Image (cartoon, coloured by chain):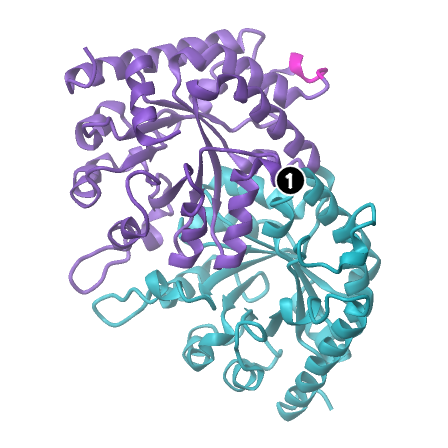
Chain colours: A purple, B cyan
Amino acid sequence: MNREQLFNLIQQKRSFLCVGLDSDLTKIPAHLLHEEDPVFAFNRQIIDATIEYTVAYKPNFAFYESRGIAGLQSLSRTMNYLEAFQDQAFTIADAKRGDIGNTSAQYAKAVFDKSISGFSFDAVTVAPYMGEDSVKPFLDFGGKWAIILALTSNKGSDDFQLFSNGSGKRLFEQVLERTQHWGSPDNIMYVVGATKAEMLSNIRDIVPDHFLLVPGVGAQGGNLQDVAKHGMNDHCGLLVNASRSIIFASNGVDFAEKAKAEAASMQQEMETLLKSAGLIQ
Amino acid sequence: MNREQLFNLIQQKRSFLCVGLDSDLTKIPAHLLHEEDPVFAFNRQIIDATIEYTVAYKPNFAFYESRGIAGLQSLSRTMNYLEAFQDQAFTIADAKRGDIGNTSAQYAKAVFDKSISGFSFDAVTVAPYMGEDSVKPFLDFGGKWAIILALTSNKGSDDFQLFSNGSGKRLFEQVLERTQHWGSPDNIMYVVGATKAEMLSNIRDIVPDHFLLVPGVGAQGGNLQDVAKHGMNDHCGLLVNASRSIIFASNGVDFAEKAKAEAASMQQEMETLLKSAGLIQ
């Protein structure tokens, strides 16, 4: 899915919501545990309940990898199911990959090349620490996206991302300035945590046109209005992720219904923000 | 395997060689392709041929993940096979993981908790960009190791790892200084590329006691003598990795024999260096 198609989807659904599929087997409703693949059964119902309000799904690979081969099977079934909604949702492999060039090329196949790995995500999250050759192989796939970590939503983000040079430039700013030249707003997005909303204006000065993937709204405490105020651009430019606050809104038999209500509530707030910005009528 | 056990193994095998299992299906010998699991058949013969000269094995996850579920099965069979050599080899999941705390905890289970994921590596490589809470969950597993990226061997390592603050301190030095306090030399190692051997003395000033995992000798051009000269400490403190130069020493039916010869040659050079340092007799 390209940038114009993503913006069209946002206008059509009047939403820039990304649902994070952090589908922890130990947290899903008990009545699903008798299913052959409880995590897939959970994801399928979450997708059915939220697809109307959601422009992107982001499986968090850790929650699948922690279950070994069984976990990868749950992920595979989930992504095959999502294929039925191909034009209705952008898909993000939240895997934080990055290694030397020939190795990153293999990681790119793992998430993008269905003929080899079985997976064909639209995008993958990438850690920038190892530099250009660690990122480029993801950008070399036509029609695919790398979503590079810039300023993350967690407490530890201060440890290195705010490391500052003699002129006051911080590492995350160096990452934004340098990496944008390795691709374009058509194949690079950035991760910027909602808990750092006050820094979004500064980030928009460096990357005015790129989409930002914004985690941290909901369970982590970020505020949607602040994110939109400082981060929205003329293509919306935001995918705001919520995981636990939606998928674990209830752990009873009504989990899908409660997830739907939570997603609908966020969509309504997003619709108001898109209208205020003149991006929809 | 703890630090003393690893040092004992190094003394016993007179080697600090780590063999990287970057077992690319498209590069393994053609005669193996009729096997039910060609990559496992390849790894098994590589392990049998090199175990005498090798203290650690490091499967590079990208080469398994790129083949989806089939790749994970090859990795699983390889690690089950290596269990027979439990006290004879340290095992490293080369996966470059790192995410917010609750997610890193899942990645830690994926590589360390056999009861859940099926894997029980001794160590995992970790990207530090997201800071303390992204690294800590790996250190919370008793008897396990995090191997944190410091200064890598690839060209792109210059992009951010050498980013320098006003006092001339570079990011990789900040990583070394800060992360060492999150654990100890008993559960943290660092990745330092052999192509940066001249910087090893400087790194040893910051982390005198930690083990360093050193890729880049062999195909990437690093020099073993320089690495030992600048990086060895009183527990050896080095695991020098070679991947392609050993496992793909030949792509014919003699691949295991050639891999053995290559590993033996490196072991002999390492034995000389260990003797010179007075670490073995």
Residue A130 in view in this figure: no
Within the image, what quadrant is residue B51 found in? bottom right
Circle 1: is it few (<14), some (14-19), or many (20+) Cα within 10 Å? many
Residue A117 spot, x, y in % from top left: 61, 39
Is residue A223 shown above or below B272? above
Is residue A117 shown above or below B204? above
> Chain ID for label 1?
B
User: Circle 1 — which element?
Assistant: helix
Is residue A197 shown above or below B224? above
Direction from residue B277 to residue B8 in the image, left or right:
right
Direction from residue B9 to residue A113 in the image, left or right:
left
Q: Main secondary structure of the magenta part?
A: loop
Find out whether residue A32 is within the magenta segment.
yes
Residue bounds of the magenta highlight = A31-35
A149, A121: nearer the viewer: A121
B255, A163: nearer the viewer: B255
Residue B36 in view in this figure: yes
Within the image, what quadrant is residue B188 found in? bottom right
**Count of numbered labels shown in the rendering:** 1
Q: Residue at x 22, y 37 (%)?
A: A209
Q: Residue at x 44, y 14 (%)?
A: A51
Q: Residue at x 68, y 71 (%)?
A: B246
Is residue B237 shown above or below A137? below
Residue B26 spot, x, y in % from top left: 66, 54
Q: Quadrant of the C terminus of chain A?
A: top left
* Residue under pointer 1: B68
